[in-house]
Amino acid sequence: MRSFIIEPPPEPGAPAGPLWIRLAWFAALALGSAAATAALAYLLKALLR
Amino acid sequence: MDFDALVLSRLQFAFTLAFHIIFPAFTIGLASFLMVLEGLWLATKNAAFRNLYLFWIKIFALSFGMGVVSGVVMSYQFGTNWSVFSNVAAPVIGPLLAFEVLTAFFLEASFLGVMLFGWRKVGPGLHFAATLLVALGTLTSAFWIISANSWMQHPTGYVRLPSGALRATDWMAVIFSPTFPYRFVHMVLAAYLSTALVVGAASAWRLLRDPEEEESCLALKMAIGMFAIVAPLQLVVGDLSGKQLLSVQPAKLAAIEAFWESRSEQPFHIAAWPDRAQETNHLSIEAPELGSWIAAGNAHAFIRGLKAFPREDRPPVFIVFWAFRIMVGLGLLMIGLGFWGAYLASRGAPERHRLFLRACVLMGPAGFVSVIAGWVVAEVGRQPYTIYGVLRTAQSVSPVSAGQVSISLLAFMVTYAIIFCVGGLYILRLIAEGAHPTAAADTEPLRHGRPPGYALAAAPDEPEPVP
């Protein structure tokens, strides 16, 4: 796993994007991760039936 | 010993648990460490904290993944190998494990995505919130698992139905059973200490090669702080947890201390060879009256020995006795390391003391060994019960054959040997690379459109005019 997979922090002094866009990313990444976890769980359950 | 389905199922559970527990213990500590690093970076803007964060988050992500994979195996074994236990205890244990998944695992899994892929997208403040939520998730996970295990150690707040199944009557009594508070704190401190030992060992390893590396110096000092504060605190909490055994699990206490006779002024056995068949200790080295003092806080206290319990209700004394001594012995070494490090730090630069750095490297795995030894004391000491005083281990096992369990145990041994050797070696390789600034160079902006490693990266686009 190299650092290009893990997103580094913004550059010092870089302007922050609009709050609503950052919040939308926050929600999208969290929900996407939860959905990926749930999908994997359902897949495992289906495979073991 | 006959290797029947019961013994093999116990071996399989112990084998898979010993692998699994390393990863949750590490991720509980590492998540909180990452939270502290990011908080310090936000507060001080010291790039060393950011570099350390970017370094340890890779190891956290790998360990989290390996913890999930090995944890799923644990859950399935409740059904495959311990179906009678599941049938009897599921109405009580099941909701606790379900809460662990819903409140802790999903919290960790959701916000880990933000931690890994969203720093520039969400900005520093929201990213720190995600790190904080993941750290909270790991602690919540520990809360539910220790709650379920503590209830198995000393069940309260339930009734037994005519069918034999258990039903909770008081959920607060189930969740907060009497041994839970001390055991929860003991486990969390063990996780913090194990992580600090790994961070200390990784930093010391780097400093033995380059004593000037700023990130490793910083991480070593943070680790020393944890050894010096948490290790003595852990001894106090462990002692309080042990004293509780006198009233809730006296047979386990007798096995831990190899007390055979019931008497006051019990001696403390520093080392011995407990003999279950002859109900005595061979080659014993003991300190008079100290056993009663340690176990009950009073050198004249009367404490029951193993002979006070029917043979069929006694735990395997040899394993419990020695697992406890390994745990405590390593704990004392951790306290010594903490005081040594604090002394060196007070005099100047611990990173210049090569003997101390070597000791830190040697002590790197000590936390995990202690955690495994501690779980051996807790689980083997609870024998011959799965739910203490309620359901015996022999009654909990699934109706499966020894052949079936042998095949699954062999499969686990081969699979784990491959997966965890590869994963473990990769983590060690990452740790050996260190959090040195060149690792963080990937994050620097391109100069003149060229990557930092390019030979003419810093050269101007246009050649300067010759006068």
Image: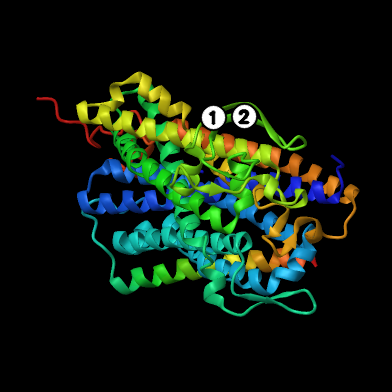
Q: Mark 2 belongs to which subunit?
A: B
Badge count: 2
Name the foreground residue: B7 vs B438: B7
Residue A47 shows in this picture: no
Residue of label 1:
B286
The quadrant of the picture occupied by the N terminus of chain B is top right
Residue B272's disc is: 2
Task: Give the residue type at disc 2.
Answer: Ala
Give the secondary structure at mark 1.
Answer: strand
Residue B117 shows in this picture: yes
Q: Relative to residue B373, is residue B147 depicted above or below?
A: below
Q: CA distance from mark 2 to mark 1?
A: 8 Å
Q: Position of residue B110 (x, y in %)?
A: 49, 65
Q: Position of residue B294 (x, y in %)?
A: 47, 43
Q: Relative to residue B181, is residue B256 depicted above or below?
A: above
Badge 1 crowding class, 10 Å Cα cut-off, few under 14, some 14 to 19, many 20 or more, is some
Q: Position of residue B258 (x, y in %)?
A: 62, 39
Name the foreground residue: B455 vs B330: B330
**In the rendered structure, are the residues bearing label 2 and label 1 in contact, judged by CB atoms less than 8 Å apart?**
yes
The quadrant of the picture occupied by the C terminus of chain B is top left
Task: Give the residue type at disc 1.
Answer: Glu
Query: Who's the residue at 74% across and 57% down the image?
Result: B77
Residue B100's disc is: none
Badge 2 crowding class, 10 Å Cα cut-off, few under 14, some 14 to 19, many 20 or more, is some
Query: Who's the residue at 43% across and 37% down the image?
Result: B197
Q: Mark 1 belongs to which subunit?
A: B
Snapshot quadrant of residue A34: bottom right
